[in-house]
Amino acid sequence: MKDSLRNISFNKFKTNPTSYLAVGIMCGLFLLLVMVLAFIDPAILIIAVPLLALPFIFASHVACYYLQVNQQISLTAYARYFMGFFHSQFRGSFRGLISLLKSLGFYIAAVFVAGFIFFLIFKAQYGQTFVESLNTLFFQYTSNAEFTYEELVALLEANDNMLLTFIVYISAVAIPLSMLAFIYYISFSSLSIYYRANVAFGAAAVLKMSVGNTYARHRSEMRKDWFSLNWPMLVLSFTGMIGFAILDLLIFKRIDLLPTFVIVGGVALLMFYLPFYFANMETIYKKYEMNFKEGNQEAIETILRRIQSSIDLSEEEKKNLEASLRGQDKEDEDK
């Protein structure tokens, strides 16, 4: 009987558990450190995630991949992998911007749903006082009336932080769905890292089209494999969000920081699963490795047809162009 993906992945992990644990825990701690920056200002994450978090996750993927060939992982190598994230060959590995926009869609939808629910709850608790305060907050600026910062703070803090609590609760409830979506989207897209690392440097258009061809044809099955192996990561992330929210409400009692606690909690427990996660991703890629290679060949043929239709190429010119698109050097051709 053929081994399941989970068995294959666990056997891969067992070949070098110490290194997988070291890389996974280090990656988890680094992500937690990046998220903690949100306590200074949540806006920092807009810069910190793409410039620090994603490159470090990328470096962890590459480091674990090289464990298969018994290559020693050093801080120098890790730094090299980190910088490799910005190489053109790996551009779009996480589809960061698209993943963010999709996640924002979930956030906006969740805000509307949570806003409606909390509106009914707060209206029942505070009555007309809440409705009038909310109307003042929403329409004060549109009336072009002066509304100072002090007046805004006083309005938010009136009636035992009524409006502040209302706004914070909506944001805190909307974050988990959008954050889980973001984790899934960047993780699913990261499967292409292994393909990109296995091909000689070639045209960015070929890489992008190759990855797109593979995902288009096998997305449904790949998605099932991803969830079958990595669902514990989403559970841990959600559990961390709930746990940190409770921690804030019961111990720190900083209602204004509740959304930040939720964000930090979303990555706080991931270090306990990341060692297995990286082995899982390698296993999934191996299953579809030939499909990625087929997607690469299809992309090259598509580009060649487009060029051939606009430019009359000789056979020799066509071969040279194909070799250039493949990015193959003489050593690769001899293999």
Image (cartoon, rainbow, N blue to C red):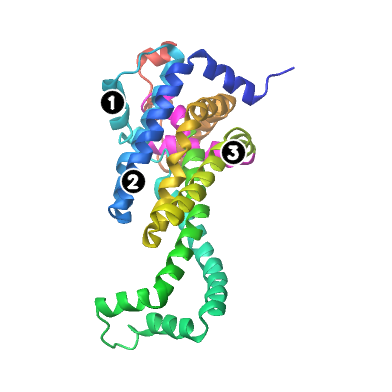
Q: Residues within 10 Å of mark 1 (few under 14, many from 20)?
A: few
Q: Residue at x 37, y 62 (%)?
A: 256
Observer-nearest of 294 and 119: 119
Residue pushed farthest front? Answer: 251
Q: Quadrant of the N terminus?
A: top right
Residue 268: give x, y in percent of width and height: 43, 40
Q: Which mark is residue 105?
A: none
Instruction: Write down the region rendered in magenta.
Output: 192-220
Q: Main secondary structure of the magenta part?
A: helix
| SS for dot 1 | helix
- Sequence-wise, the earlier of marks 2 and 1 is 2
Identify the residue under disc 3.
231
The disc, 3 or 1, on the residue closer to the chain's N-terminal end is: 1
According to the picture, the residue beneath numbered tag 1 turns out to be: 80
Q: Inspect the magenta stretch and tell me whether residue 97 lies in it.
A: no
Q: Is residue 108 visible?
A: yes
Q: Amino acid at mark 1?
A: Arg
Image vertical order of residue 40 relative to residue 267, above or below: below
Say which element carries label 3: helix
Q: Position of residue 218 (x, y in %)?
A: 61, 37
**Residue 36's disc number:** 2
Amino acid at pointer 3: Trp
Task: Estimate the spatial distance between the alpha carbons at disc 3 and disc 1, rounded to whole Å.
Answer: 31 Å
